[in-house]
Image: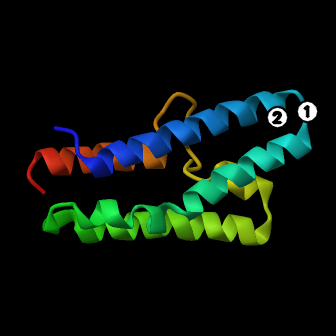
Amino acid sequence: MQNAFVEWLNTRCVDITELEAEGKILRDAGDAEAFREVMRKKAELLAGLAKEGGLHVDALPEKIKEKARLRLARFTASAENALALESVFYMSALLFPDNHQEGEPNDLELFREEMQSLICAGG
């Protein structure tokens, strides 16, 4: 069962994956300024999650609305902090815990899977 919230999250996950891939290419090529811009786009996308996701959250089952709202607010707050600090390192580290291994899902992808499971289980 797919719902609008999970579909929206999936779209954001794809957007982040594309930005991360572009950023890796730029970083490996030594283009620091272009890398900074891509990481800024990533942070801006994440900073907009709470606001953008509002309508989708409202359509969720009552039991999981608050959990979804809080998680989106945390993603947004972290991204806003990274942008305020203008820290490329912080922007690039958004969604990745310290022990993250390449190929593992990032925090947004894990959240999407958790929401999908909760929705399938009936909230």
Which sits in the foreground, 72 or 103? Answer: 72
Q: Are marks 2 and 1 in contact (CB under 8 Å)?
A: yes
Residue with the most extreme left position: 122
Q: Secondary structure at mark 1?
A: loop
What's the residue at 77%, 70% (across, down)? 85
Label drawn at residue 123: none
Residue position marked by numbered label 1 in the rendering: 30
Q: Which quadrant, please, contains the N terminus? A: top left
Q: Which quadrant, please, contains the C terminus? A: bottom left
Q: Percent x, y for residue 3?
A: 23, 46
**Label 1 Cα crowd, 10 Å radius (few <14 / some 14-19 / many 20+):** few
- Residue 110 seen from this side: no
Q: Percent x, y for residue 99?
A: 55, 44
Residue 81's place in the image compared with 32, above or below, is: below
Q: Quadrant of residue 47?
A: bottom right
Q: CA distance from mark 2 to mark 1?
A: 5 Å
Q: Amino acid at mark 1?
A: Gly
Label drawn at residue 27: 2
What's the residue at 10%, 48% (across, down)? 121
- Residue 64 seen from this side: yes
Residue 44's place in the image compared with 77, above or below, is: above
What's the residue at 71%, 32% (across, down)? 22
Q: Give left or right: position of 65 versus 120.
A: right
Colouring: rainbow
Which sits in the foreground, 6 or 20? Answer: 6
Q: Quadrant of residue 84?
A: bottom right
